[in-house]
Image (cartoon, rainbow, N blue to C red):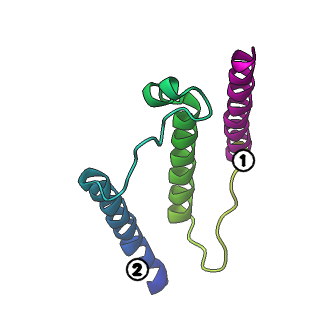
Amino acid sequence: MNSVVVLTRAMGPIAVGAFGAAVVLGLLHGTIRTTGVFAAKGCSQRRRRTEPSAERVQLLLFTCACSAAYLMRVAHEPNMTALPNVDTPWIAGAAASHGLYVASKVWRRYTDARRQKP
């Protein structure tokens, strides 16, 4: 096996782990600010502070799952000339996830605007 492939397989997980550890430490120490990341936006001030947005949570979870699956595929199919293609189900899932997120934002703004009319 090519020595570059062996080195990449050995150092790739270490580099990803170090990056993950840096992010976790940044979150724990407060250098990475996460205030309001999951808060519902585009609605009343009271609701914005108290309710997390289910759409934002599902969007983050899908993005993490898709990224992890792609990284695993890259690790198991090393190719020095190109990255592997993204599977069609992941693309369809991303379209559905983003569509749900945008549709919920539109719906929330529409219903809030109707409530504020005299």
> Depth-wise, is mark 1 or mark 2 nearer the camera?
1
Amino acid under disc 1: Ile
Extreme-bottom residue of the structure: 3
Image position of 9 with respect to 61: above or below: below
Q: Position of residue 87 (x, y in %)?
A: 70, 51
Residue 86, position as x, y percentages in the image: 68, 56
Q: Position of residue 44 (x, y in %)?
A: 57, 26
The magenta span reads 90-118
Residue 91 — which label? 1
Of residues 87 and 105, the one nearer the viewer is 105
Separation of marks 1 and 2 at Cα, in angstroms: 30 Å
Mark 2 element type: helix
User: x, y percentage for residue 7?
Assistant: 40, 80
Residue 94 on the magenta segment: yes
Left or right position of 67 against 87: left
Residue beneath the point at 75% across and 18% down: 117
Q: Residue at x 40, y 65 (%)?
A: 16
Circle nearer the N terminus (1, 2) = 2
The residue under label 2 is: 7
Amino acid type at image mark 2: Leu
Judged left or right of residue 97, residue 41 is: left
How packed is label 2: few (under 14 Cα within 10 Å), some, or many (20 or more)?
few
Give whichever of 51, 57 is nearer the camera.
51
In the figure, residue 101 lies in which quadrant?
top right
